[in-house]
């Protein structure tokens, strides 16, 4: 008897879902839908597109488990009731470049703490931009998550921000996560937000865990950022270097030690 599993790719331009036999890898069915253009998008558009893609793929009723791979770095802000506060700023929105530079100067050791110096793509720089330019929105922030986190959470049907979950790969693109200790750097987050009040961040689960279940009973896995997911998909190994040319261009390598750039 076959066991069906699904993979979702929620990217900048579109969403795709493939449903496969977990034992043989055989493609059973699939669906896709477009995302809005621009660098600032209402997350509800991603959710609506996913519903269309799932419908085209024949639904999830017979799917045992699902995981989401998503565009990284984008900032989704939620209030205490789980409502989206403003449109998400995507990785390709560069308005926060000055804020990235400022945070790098405020924290000369940021690359040692998070693995990378900030650029405008990173979530932390976008949080600082909102704090400086939209204080009324910043005051409402109760939780911060990324596109992949938001979709995974929505699939569980929860409206409780404490149920948000993510994985290490997407957390590592925020600019306030320490990949060595696998914990969030709350000092960096407070500096980005210009406030030390408590903010809910998605709990980090491993690839062997489930964050919840959909109404169909389908279990929702940790998922990953899109480039990390690609690395798994092509079975990259230590010493391999991968170049990906899509909406953005990336080059990444597999290493047995933590790197700091």
Image (spheres, rainbow, N blue to C red):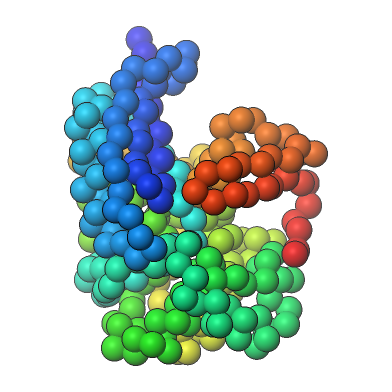
Q: Nearer the viewer, residue 156 or 38?
A: 38
Quick one: which residue is furthest to the top in this view? 1
Query: Does 251 sit left or right of 123 as displayed?
Result: right
Please give the name of the residue rendered at 54% of the width and 71% of the height, measured from the top-left corner. 120
Q: How many marks?
A: 0
Q: x, y (%) of residue 121? A: 53, 66
Task: From the viewer's perspective, tell me whether residue 192 is left or right of residue 164.
Answer: right
The answer to whether residue 57 of the structure is visible from this angle is yes
Where is residue 199 shown, x and y percent of the image?
41, 77
Q: Does 21 sit left or right of 214 as displayed?
A: right
Can residue 113 be seen by looking at this rendering?
A: no
Q: Quadrant of the C terminus?
A: bottom right
Image location of residue 60, percent across then percent down: 25, 30
Question: Image quadrant for the N terminus?
Answer: top left
Quarter residue 235 falls in: top right
* Residue at figure coordinates x 26%, y 73% from the top left: 85
> Is 221 located above or below residue 83 in the figure?
above
Q: At x 58% / y 60%, what residue is drawn?
A: 172
| Relative height, residue 256 to residue 4 (above, below) | below
Position in image of residue 234 (x %, y %):
61, 30
Foreground pick, 207 / 191: 191
Residue 42 occupies quadrant: bottom left
Which residue is rendered at x = 29% and y = 43% of the image?
Answer: 34
Q: Vertical placement of 171 versus 27: above or below?
A: below
In the rendered image, which quarter is residue 227 located in?
top right
Which residue is nearer to you in this view: 94 or 100? 94
């Amino acid at each position: 008897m076959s066991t069906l599993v699904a993979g979702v790719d929620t990217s900048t331009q579109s969403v795709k879902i493939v449903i496969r036999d977990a034992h043989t890898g055989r493609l059973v069915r699939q669906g896709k839908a477009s995302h809005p253009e621009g660098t600032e998008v209402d997350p509800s558009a991603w959710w609506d597109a996913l519903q269309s893609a799932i419908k085209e793929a024949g639904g999830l009723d017979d799917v045992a488990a699902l995981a989401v791979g998503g565009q990284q770095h984008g900032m989704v802000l939620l209030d205490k009731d789980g409502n989206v506060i403003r449109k998400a700023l995507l990785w390709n929105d560069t308005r926060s470049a000055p804020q990235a530079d400022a945070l790098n100067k405020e924290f000369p050791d940021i690359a040692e703490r998070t693995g990378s110096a900030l650029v405008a793509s990173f979530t932390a720089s976008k949080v600082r931009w909102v704090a400086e330019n939209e204080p009324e929105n910043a005051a409402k922030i109760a939780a911060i998550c990324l596109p992949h986190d938001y979709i995974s959470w929505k699939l569980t049907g929860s409206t409780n921000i404490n149920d948000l979950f993510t994985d290490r790969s997407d957390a590592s693109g925020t600019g306030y996560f320490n990949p060595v200790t696998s914990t969030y750097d709350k000092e960096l987050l407070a500096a980005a937000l210009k406030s030390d009040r408590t903010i809910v961040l998605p709990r980090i689960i491993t690839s062997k865990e489930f964050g919840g279940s959909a109404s169909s009973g389908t279990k929702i896995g940790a998922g990953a950022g899109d480039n990390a997911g690609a690395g798994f998909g092509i079975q990259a190994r230590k010493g391999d270097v991968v170049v990906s040319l899509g909406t953005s261009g990336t080059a990444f390598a597999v290493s047995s030690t933590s790197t700091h750039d």
